[in-house]
Image (cartoon, rainbow, N blue to C red):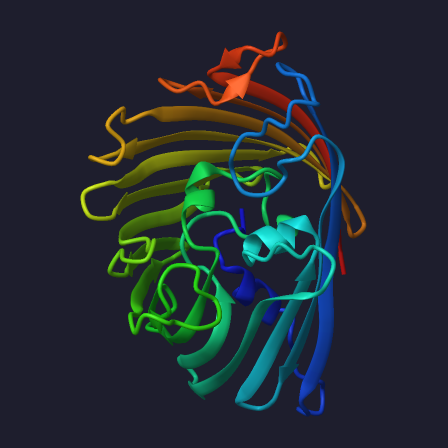
Amino acid sequence: MKKLITLSMLFMAGVVFAQDGSPKFTLSGSVDAYYQTYLSAPDNVGTSFGTAFAGQSGFALGMGNIIASYEGETVGAVLDLVTGPRGAGATFNSDIVDGIVNQAYVYWNVSEGTTLTFGRWNTFLGYEVIAPAANFNYSCSYLFSSGPFSHMGLKADFALSDEWSLMLAVTNPWDVNDTSMTGEYALGAQLGYSGQFLNLYYDSGNNDGLGFEIDYTGGFDLSDSFFLGINAAYNDNDGSGFYGAALYPQLATSDSFSLGLRGEYFGYHGDANPAEESVLGLTLTGSYSIENLIIKPEIRLDSWSDSMPYVDSDGMASDNLAAFTLAAIYSF
């Protein structure tokens, strides 16, 4: 239920001052792996749900990352290095062996309520994040997979009050994480109120850009043990794009075990998608914690309205796919 913050804020929260007020250096990170088998299709046909990450059958590596954080009295820096297929997918890098820069930024706490951040940082759009340790479900949603993973640029965070916050950003467009060769830039904004966030993003849509996206991310503690997360988004790029909504009910049955469902409806609209096809995805995930290790058994079923992107047990085209996944995530 605390998945509403971006990955950068998650790891900055672990940086604290020493008792004498001197600068503090910390290391943190995670390692994850999984096993996946398809319940409605053979494992050897190369099919997958088509969403980001966790797209391999059999035993597979997710990612390993190390985050180095250094904070002085008013300034600091974060370097997040990642490797493995999930890291390569998040940074659009086909090399899954060498270390890849996921995040690298410097920041300046200009005042008690204002922080400037310069560099590459994970996206503020959406409910889910890249690092699996910060997500309840192991597999990813269509909404998360369709938006940007990271931004390269400058942002300003303002704590307007105890409840209200504002973020403004100018970045390279889409997922251009290193340089912008077109002379174009993107604008981003986030307005937050008591754990609810309204996000806006805009680029020109040229050169495979994202165009315009409005995104709501939030959630509510309905009881001490039950949380409901919410994500909804609408995207338009020159008259075509995507839309969708997802609910994340999560029930803590004990201190060590929780059960959560992701119910997502996602679709395409516009001239570039004349069929206006859509998909209903249901993902049931258990989460069992042993010290810093999280074990996640998961069952997922996706069903498309018009297209048939999968195969069935006989190798014929099918509009639905079911899978069982068992993931293990260690955070340090």
Answer above or below: position of 126 versus 158: above
Residue at left offset 43%, top offset 80% = 115
Q: Quadrant of residue 146?
A: top left
Answer above or below: position of 122 versus 267: below
Counting the numbered discs, the total is 0
Pick the residue in front: 253 or 272. 272
Q: Hey, which residue is sitting farthest top in the picture?
A: 314
Answer above or below: position of 46 versus 190: above
x, y percent for residue 36: 71, 29
Residue at left offset 68%, top offset 17% = 42
Q: Is residue 175 left or right of residue 48?
A: left
Q: Looking at the figure, which quarter contains the C terminus?
A: bottom right
Answer above or below: position of 96 versus 265: below
x, y percent for residue 318: 50, 14
Q: Hey, which residue is sitting farthest right in the picture?
A: 290
x, y percent for residue 219: 43, 44
x, y percent for residue 268: 30, 33
Residue at left offset 38%, top offset 59% = 174
Any part of residue 328 in sight = no
Q: Is residue 117 left or right of residue 10?
A: left
Residue at left offset 59%, top offset 20% = 322
Q: Is residue 48 left or right of residue 296?
A: left
Any part of residue 215 in sight = yes
Q: Quadrant of residue 116?
A: bottom left
